[in-house]
Image: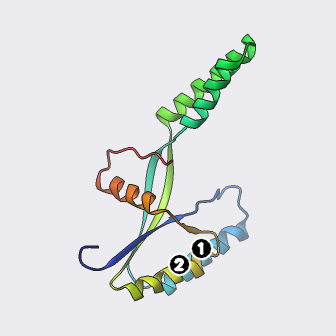
């Protein structure tokens, strides 16, 4: 960063809490509790809504519609295609990220190892690419932009 400090972003892996067992939820809570006890520096959890991207599925259905001769199957495929267009226009995906901040490179490496030990090994966090990190920062600085992942 400009002030010679360090910042990194990790993606938090979300789970379906309704279908998860009580012991699974409790174990995840204990892992986050362990993380907060070990990590004493500033961190921030961010939730971002992204437009649902169904372009690849739309392309697939369009190819199938173009290649079929069966009128019943074509009608079925057209219905599915229109559903995907609606999902693309009106639905969003919510993703959560963990931002960490450090004053020096050594503290950054220490913070990263704490995240690895507590969250990544329990499949609660994962590293993301530099391009995705840049896109997230751009989204945070300009809330009106839409981001689609490649």
Write down the quadrant of residue 58 in the picture.
Answer: top right
Residue 1, x across and y down, in percent: 29, 73
Question: Which quadrant of the figure has residue 40?
Answer: bottom left
- Labels 2 & 1 near each other (Cβ < 8 A): yes
For the image, the number of numbered tags is 2
Q: Identify which residue, 123 or 8, lies in the foreground.
A: 8
User: Looking at the image, which residue sits at the far left?
Assistant: 3
Asked whether, in this view, residue 50 is left or right of residue 77, the answer is left
Q: Position of residue 110 (x, y in %)?
A: 47, 86
Q: At 39% across and 44% down in the image, what residue appears?
A: 146
Question: In front here: 25 or 15?
Answer: 15
Nearer the observer, 136 or 92: 136
Residue drawn at 43 percent across, 54 percent down? 48
On residue 120, the disc is: 1
Colour scheme of the picture: rainbow
Of residues 135 and 29, the one drawn nearer to the viewer in this rendering: 135
The residue located at (52%, 83%) in the rendering is 114
SS for callout 2: helix
**Label 1 crowd bin: few (<14), some (14–19), many (20+), radius 10 Å:** some
Residue at 51% x, 34% y: name it: 88
Which SS class for mark 1? helix
- Distance from disc 2 to disc 1, alpha carbons, whole Å, reads 6 Å
Give the crowd class for mark 2: few <14, some 14-19, many >=20 residues within 10 Å: many
Of the numbered discs 2 and 1, the one sitting upstream in the chain is 2
Q: Position of residue 25 (x, y in %)?
A: 66, 68
Image disc number at residue 91: none
Mark number, residue 115: 2
Q: Position of residue 34 (x, y in %)?
A: 56, 82
């Amino acid at each position: 960063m400009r002030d010679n400090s360090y910042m990194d972003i990790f993606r938090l892996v979300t789970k379906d809490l309704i279908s998860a067992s009580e012991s699974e939820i409790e174990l995840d809570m204990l892992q986050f509790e362990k993380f907060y006890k070990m990590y004493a520096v500033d961190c921030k959890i961010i939730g971002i809504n992204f437009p649902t991207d169904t372009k690849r599925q739309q392309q697939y259905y369009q190819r199938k519609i173009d290649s079929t001769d069966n009128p019943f199957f074509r009608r079925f495929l057209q219905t599915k295609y229109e559903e995907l267009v609606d999902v693309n226009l009106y639905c969003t995906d919510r993703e959560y990220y963990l931002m960490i901040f450090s004053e020096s490179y050594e503290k950054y490496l220490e913070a990263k190892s704490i995240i690895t030990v507590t969250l990544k090994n329990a499949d609660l966090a994962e590293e993301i690419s530099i391009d995705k990190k840049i896109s997230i920062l751009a989204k945070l600085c300009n809330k009106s932009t839409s981001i689609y992942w490649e």
